């Protein structure tokens, strides 16, 4: 079993982007600028956004955080989005999800200019990705592809099973894994809460991507000997023994599954750390006007 070490791979990618940004600026390029909108005070969102902002500082980007209270109206949030769309200094921005219930996430996502949509959530970017055209690929799928590439994992002709059909992970991941390029060329099965015989389907997976948000759901009996297991789950569970009061659990029971896997991602220290690299890569592409 080989560990797909998100900590090591993400540090390497950040190091590479930092060097590229230095060269870009030395050649007269503009310092990339990422902005983030954070609504409310959700603990997990606070942590993610803080980490995104910190990563920007580390690799030489400018970052801006716009915070709003949970009572902000959809109209006011749309105005904030429009402000960033029209701010020539901001190359790309994200609206951290989830949003309060009275705000439509789809409406907000569609209001972001596709050219600045470094999360890759706008329908134009999703559509371009589906057609294999240059587009911002969202952060988690980007992180998974990058792990497969850097570990030189063969994907062509393999059966890839994706558990979960979310707009952010499961759906784009299934599209990307069947593309006619590396990493891709898989035969893909996308599964979800209504799937029958889930365990039997998973047992036929050469590459199993688990993104359903149920801690330690996948046990050894779901996994074929020698499979590549990618765990996208990050659920906070109460753990009194931890200083923070919680522990992070993946969707895969790591200790149970690891002996059967050829490659496996740990949680924490796996896919989660890779996602920020996707965001930083997209922001740099936006600054270089590589896609739009
Ligand atoms: N919430 C959970 N993951 C993400 C993400 O990748 N982007 C944004 N904007 N919100 C999220």
Image (spheres, grey):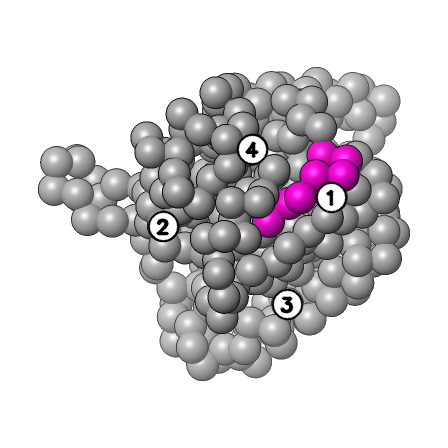
Closest to the observer: 166 or 80?
A: 166
Considering only vertical position in the picture, is 126 above or below 245? below
> Can residue 98 be seen in this snapshot?
yes
Discs 4, 1 touching: Cβ within 8 Å: no
Q: Which residue is at 45% across, 81% downward?
A: 102
Judging by the rendered image, the residue that carries numbered circle 4 is 228
Residue 177 shown in magenta: no
At a point 51% along the width and 37% down the height, the residue shown is: 224
Task: Tell me if label 3 and label 1 are in contact, CB under 8 Å.
Answer: no
Residue identifier under label 1: 186
Q: What is the distance, in whole Å, between disc 4 and disc 1 at their CAs?
A: 13 Å
Q: CA distance from mark 2 to mark 4?
A: 16 Å
Question: Residue 217 shows which numbered tag?
Answer: 2
* Secondary-structure class at tag 2: loop
Neighbours of disc 1 within 10 Å: few (<14), some (14-19), many (20+): many
The magenta segment: 155-161
Question: Up-down: is 241 above or below 214?
Answer: above
């Amino acid at each position: 079993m080989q560990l797909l070490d998100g900590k090591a791979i993400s540090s390497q990618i950040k190091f590479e982007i930092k060097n590229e940004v230095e060269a870009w600026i030395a050649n007269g390029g503009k310092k990339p600028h990422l902005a983030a909108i954070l609504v409310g005070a959700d603990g997990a969102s606070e942590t993610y956004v803080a980490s995104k902002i910190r990563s920007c500082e580390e690799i030489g980007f400018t970052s801006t955080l716009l915070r709003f209270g949970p009572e902000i109206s959809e109209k006011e949030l749309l105005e904030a989005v429009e402000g960033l769309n029209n701010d020539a200094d901001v190359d790309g921005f994200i609206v951290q999800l989830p949003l309060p219930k009275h705000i439509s996430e789809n409406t907000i996502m569609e209001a972001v200019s596709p050219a600045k949509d470094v999360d890759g959530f706008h329908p134009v970017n999703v559509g371009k990705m589906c057609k294999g055209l240059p587009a911002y690929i969202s952060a988690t799928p980007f992180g998974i592809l990058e792990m497969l590439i850097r570990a030189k994992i063969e994907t062509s002709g393999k059966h890839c099973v994706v558990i979960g059909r979310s707009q952010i992970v499961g759906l784009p991941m299934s599209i990307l894994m069947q593309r006619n390029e590396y990493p891709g060329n898989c035969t893909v099965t996308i599964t979800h809460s209504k799937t029958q015989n889930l365990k039997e389907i998973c047992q036929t997976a050469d590459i199993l991507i688990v993104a359903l948000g149920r801690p330690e759901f996948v046990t050894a009996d779901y996994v074929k000997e020698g499979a590549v297991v990618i765990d996208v789950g990050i659920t906070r569970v109460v753990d009194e023994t931890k200083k923070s009061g919680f522990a992070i659990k993946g969707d895969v029971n790591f200790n149970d599954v690891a002996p059967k896997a050829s490659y496996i991602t740990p949680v924490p220290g796996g896919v989660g750390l890779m996602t920020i690299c996707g965001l930083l890569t997209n922001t740099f592409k936006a600054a270089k006007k590589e896609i739009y």
